[in-house]
Image (cartoon, rainbow, N blue to C red):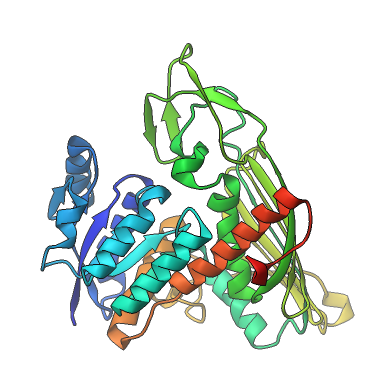
């Protein structure tokens, strides 16, 4: 296989990110399978037509069902809102198409498990979109842990802080509606933290959480794109049906303790996606707003030079970095999607399942749901019980 023919459903925020990745791979990763941008699909004919021209897709359509029946499509990329992930995924797998689906995998744990069962029964390849795993600095943290450089892991603390909802007059975008988004900061931001914890530390055994919705009603929007929305000052208001902020604690199977915070009400924080890991031999700190850097500390350094050091993860020794620029020439948010798609293409070349896949999506959904149950019951919940 030299090329993989892509049909993509969704054309806004994530659609642009995925399209950019497909276009750049042949330029920077010429030895991997080349994605062919065949068809882009969306509900609004004029909007998807404009996106097709801007992003570089060969064709566009508003009918996703017919897209799945085309013989010239190998993989379906789903980055439409969360409430359609299940329906499209199941139909795509049953049509024999491989599936790349954005997170969260589904609105509920039950739906995500059904999706996993269907793709496994169909024998297709499947991937879920946790792009933050693919920052070279994060992959360095993983390498240090796997090599035992941090020793026994005691703590994983993570926080994803944004502030785009602080204004109470920000419109009621789809991400604030449970029937479309599934959840608020918990499933949107917290899902990334949970997957990062699974990737770096391992499985969690039990959780306890709390949440709140600070602004109960917001103006009905007239237009929505990605994380932005517009509306009139005198617009009718609708109910916010998701959380604005969620915090939870966790125990890991390896004995580590975890804390997680996700909020859209942290004034001054645009995209503070961070974690700190403390072990018996050292610690690491990562902040996505400085995504090329990893703060590293080792306990066996001499006393007179101990302290956190800044490692710039741009040398050829770091994951993916030899395909980019000279050392010190940093990369950005969009490159995490390119690395993610490279992993997908390499999985086809090596005839294996890509990672993360739907199994990881289900594991994430299990924690999300366990936290929801904990909040409702006001008690610790075992992951094995959900």
Question: Splitting the image into 4 quarters, where does residue 71 fall?
Answer: bottom left
Which residue is at 29% across, 47% downward?
11
On the image, the x and y values in percent for residue 382 come to: 71, 68
Image height of 307 relative to 303, above or below = above
Q: Is residue 290 left or right of residue 152?
A: left
- Residue 37 shows up from this direction: yes
On the image, the x and y values in percent for residue 10 come to: 30, 49
Image height of 44 relative to 63, above or below = above
Which residue is at 32% across, 87% downward?
350
Question: Which is nearer the eye, 39 or 306?
Answer: 39
On the image, the x and y values in percent for residue 1 come to: 19, 82
Question: Splitting the image into 4 quarters, where does residue 138 fall?
Answer: bottom right
Q: How many marks?
A: 0
- Residue 134 shows up from this direction: no
On the image, the x and y values in percent for residue 168 come to: 60, 24
Question: Which is nearer the eye, 81 or 335?
Answer: 81
Question: Which is nearer the eye, 59 or 75?
Answer: 75
Q: Residue furthest toward the right?
A: 303
Which residue is at 55% across, 74% downward?
139
Looking at the rendered image, the quarter that the C terminus falls into is: bottom right
Question: Which is nearer the eye, 304 or 84?
Answer: 84
Q: Residue furthest toward the top?
A: 234
Which residue is at 12% across, 55% downward?
58
Image height of 349 relative to 37, above or below = below
């Amino acid at each position: 296989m030299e090329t993989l023919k892509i049909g993509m459903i969704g054309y806004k925020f994530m659609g642009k990110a995925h399209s950019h990745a497909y276009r750049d791979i042949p330029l920077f990763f010429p030895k991997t399978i080349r994605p062919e941008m065949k068809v882009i699909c969306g509900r609004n004919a004029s909007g998807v037509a404009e996106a097709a021209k801007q992003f570089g897709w060969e064709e566009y359509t508003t009918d996703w069902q017919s897209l799945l029946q085309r013989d010239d499509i190998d993989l379906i990329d789903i980055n439409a809102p969360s409430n359609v992930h299940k329906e499209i995924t199941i139909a795509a797998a049953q049509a024999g198409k491989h599936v790349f689906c954005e997170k969260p995998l589904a609105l509920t744990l039950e739906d995500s498990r059904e999706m996993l069962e269907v793709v496994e029964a169909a024998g297709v390849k499947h991937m879920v979109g946790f792009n933050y795993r693919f920052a070279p600095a994060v992959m360095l943290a993983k390498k240090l842990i796997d090599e035992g450089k941090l020793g026994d892991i005691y703590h994983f603390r993570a926080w994803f802080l944004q502030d785009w909802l602080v204004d109470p007059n920000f419109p009621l975008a789809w991400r604030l509606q449970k029937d479309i988004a599934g959840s608020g900061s918990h499933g949107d931001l917290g899902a990334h933290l949970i997957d990062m914890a699974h990737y770096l530390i391992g499985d969690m055994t039990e959780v306890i959480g709390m949440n709140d919705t600070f602004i109960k009603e917001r103006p009905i929007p007239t237009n929505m794109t990605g994380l932005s929305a517009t509306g009139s000052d005198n617009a009718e208001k609708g109910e916010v049906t998701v959380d604005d902020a969620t915090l939870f604690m966790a125990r890991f199977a390896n004995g580590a303790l975890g804390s997680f915070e996700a909020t859209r009400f942290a004034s001054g924080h645009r995209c503070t996606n961070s974690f700190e890991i403390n072990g018996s031999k050292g610690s690491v700190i990562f902040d996505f707003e400085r995504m090329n850097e990893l703060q590293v500390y080792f306990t066996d350094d001499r006393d007179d030079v101990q302290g956190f050091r800044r490692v710039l993860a741009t040398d050829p020794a770091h994951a993916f970095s030899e395909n980019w620029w000279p050392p010190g020439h940093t990369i950005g948010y969009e490159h995490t999607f390119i690395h993610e798609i490279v992993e997908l293409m390499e999985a086809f070349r090596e005839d294996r399942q890509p990672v993360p896949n739907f199994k990881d999506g289900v594991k994430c959904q299990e924690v999300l749901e366990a936290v929801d149950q904990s909040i409702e019951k006001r008690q610790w919940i075992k992951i094995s019980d959900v």
